[in-house]
Image (cartoon, rainbow, N blue to C red):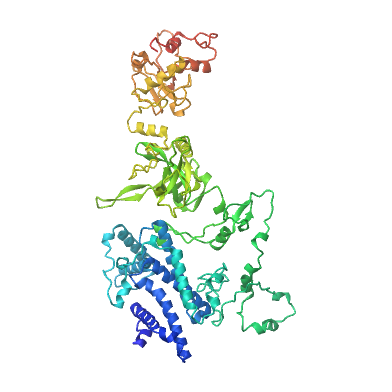
Amino acid sequence: SATKLLHPDDPQDVPRAIELMQAIITFSQLQHDSIDSSFSTNIDIRADLAAIKLLGDLIQSILLPFINTNLSLTQQVQCLSCYAHLSFTIFRSHRRAFMPYQLYYDTQTMTKNIVFCICKQQVLDPREKFFIGDSGDDRLELHFGHTRMIGGHNSGCSYSQVLDRLGAAKDIDGVFKRHPELDPGHHRLKMGTRHENIDHINCEMWRGDIVSGRCDLPSAWQMGRDMVLSNLTRSQIDPINYSFATLFSDPSIDMLRPFGLNKYLGISVDDTEDVSMSAPPISSTPQVLEDVSSHPALTDVELMHVDGDNESDEPILTFEEALTAQSDINLPPPQSVPIPSDPSAPPIPEGPGIRADDYLLFKGRWIHKQTICRLVINKDFVSKSCNRLERVRAGYTKVNKRINMSAGRITDGNLFLVGDTFLTIIRSGRTVSVGVLRSTLISSNNVSCASINITVMKAARTTVKITGQLLTIIPTHHPSDSPLTLTQFLWTGGYVKSHSIIPGTSDSTDRVVILTVPGSLVEPINPEPTFIRLREDINSDDFAEIKGGQSTWQIAQDALQAACNLLWEKSLETKVNLKSLASVTPSDVNTFPYRLLNGTTAILSAEGTHLLIASEGERISECPLCSAKAVDMRAHAGLHILRTLTNTPEDVALLEPVVVHSACGFCARSGWPECAITITSHSNAAPTLATKCMYQHHFRYGFADNGSKNKPCRNIPLKCELCHPALPPKPGQTSRRTMFGAVEAVWRYNMPGHILKEHEEYSVPGYKSIGVPLPASMLKAMALSDLE
């Protein structure tokens, strides 16, 4: 049976391999008495049993986390830590005699990936379970099965057929993700007693506590390390190989680089060194590397015999390897590294955790060395595309292209990158407000790109489109003794969601709102970071979705309002249709538009909102000056103008003053281009008016010209007879036919100011007594009635 376990018929028989590993573990646990017995005289047998005991501990630490369904997540991490430290120690001592480089690198990478994934799950949602089996290649195997299934009985296929099958397999995976009820999953529903059942363990079978938030990674990792130290102290391994505190104090040594020198075993091109080579010794004093090129008198044969006595004791290193090994030792201490002084250079970065020695001055900017290394090493990196056609790579788009990853693409302050935060105006119901989004895609002429110049993006005729996710922000609350404190809005870590109907059903699900807006309506922002736990004006429970729960960013309410007004003005300049603005219908109305603590909308474009209401066929009935409700805005605004003309005080304070002789007759505001009005005269009908004022409404021209006791305001648009005089009748006729056409109109209450500005030669009663008398028709049109 031992021969069958050691030499199975199928080398990939997983249950048989697990059976062998369990047999070694059981055998090693039964030999404690023989190993610890001081009366045994057979030293060779005791040495073999001690080696098997060490091997059993190693196998147990890597096997139990995956097959013992009673282990908690903390116990699993302890076992993995035990394996990582134990394999690190044995590999430093025996190298390839212990295991191949590739196997060592793969197992250590697997351990690192599991620990990283647990940490990531704790950040995302510590209340969820974490099954370490999900960090394996099961999904890749399922994808391979779907791909093979599509081919039927045809196991051979061409390159083009493989691409088609991979694309179809991805479609099947997408269907299963959207409709999990269609996926039959694994057929095994419970854990059996046979070894074959171990290969089918899933999360539903696990009985241990694997909730990620209940696992303390640092303490579990330390406990695994202590377990290894307690076992290794009784072994024959040199203590220098498990002096972890000393070894890991060297930044060039870690689990994946057991010998330092920045070499990752199993992936380096020069891993074909001698098996008998031992680990380089750790020396506290730097060694002086002598450049053999400085001895021209030595021949090649003599160079081979330099320091020949020590050749058998120390590893043979090339000149480049030795230079790399000594580079960190020969460097002067960080305090002695001089920083080049340049009078025109900007200040050196300062702050907690910032080392000035980590920055280099390049073209007047301080660049971190890590950024430079990343740009040099990963200069040909191509990020994963979100476009399925590019992922399939079936000839649609050339995706294996090089991207210019120069330093300017990262450090240039005039670039907008994927992942940046920006503002844009959004419609939500009958409200036009501003939204905070995080960009996920930048496209120019329907071609995605990693970054875009901000000037090009915000141009009026730009073809750039920005896609982003709508973020959730909440306001700060202020104590009653400081009501004038500026309100800040903080990101909660969440996203605004909306209902999405599942096709073919009446059910719906909530999905994050994703919007695509033109680049001209994008305003990049750089929010201010803040610490959640140091603030007293927020409830920390509202920030449960923040990764780590420590810090977020904030932006002031007045900055959001200013950006909203700016974006609305830009939409008017670029003549963006109101209905073409991005629209949002959130599943929770309290998440957007952003609201204050009392439930009112915090950021609002009043003009855009009123115009949106008017475009839906409803008249705006709220005065922009006093916020009063008015059925007839023309008559109501005329009263504000009359009070200003006659110096009559208002009953309430106005939001903005009325400017005499230039106020719009519909809204009583001045300086708004859309309030310009034209009039067209007709011979047998009332004049027609044309204006883009959002407060405009239809009224009877003749009735408004006469006024009434209830509506004394007679402010109507008039045609200035001085600007557009009526021609005298032709000889022999008593009248001349009226020339139809739209001309600029002047509101009756603005006529005196118009004459004073445009016709200075005329006198205006009550304003200017010297000048040419006005025509009688003009005086009659300007005169106020007794009711007024």
Q: Is residue 266 visible?
A: yes
> Along the horizontal axis of the image, is 549 left or right of 13?
right
How many marks on residues?
A: 0
Residue at position x 55%, y 8% from top? 770
Residue at position x 64%, y 74% from top? 319
* Image spot of residue 65 (x, y percent): 38, 71
> Along the horizontal axis of the image, is 37 left or right of 632?
right
> Along the horizontal axis of the image, is 113 left or right of 206?
right
* Image spot of residue 646 (x, y percent): 45, 14
Q: Which residue is outermost to the right?
A: 297
Say if 751 sits above or below 594 in the image: above
Quadrant of the image for the N terminus? bottom left
Q: Which residue is outermost to the bottom?
A: 41
Quadrant of the image for the C terminus? top left
* Image spot of residue 442 (x, y percent): 46, 50
Q: Nearer the viewer, residue 153 or 361?
A: 361
Residue at position x 46%, y 64% from top? 218
* Image spot of residue 313 (x, y percent): 61, 82
Say if 616 sits above or below 234 in the image: above
Q: Nearer the viewer, residue 484 or 121?
A: 484
Q: Is residue 106 visible?
A: no
Say if 443 sits above or below 89 in the image: above
Q: Which residue is outermost to the front?
A: 39
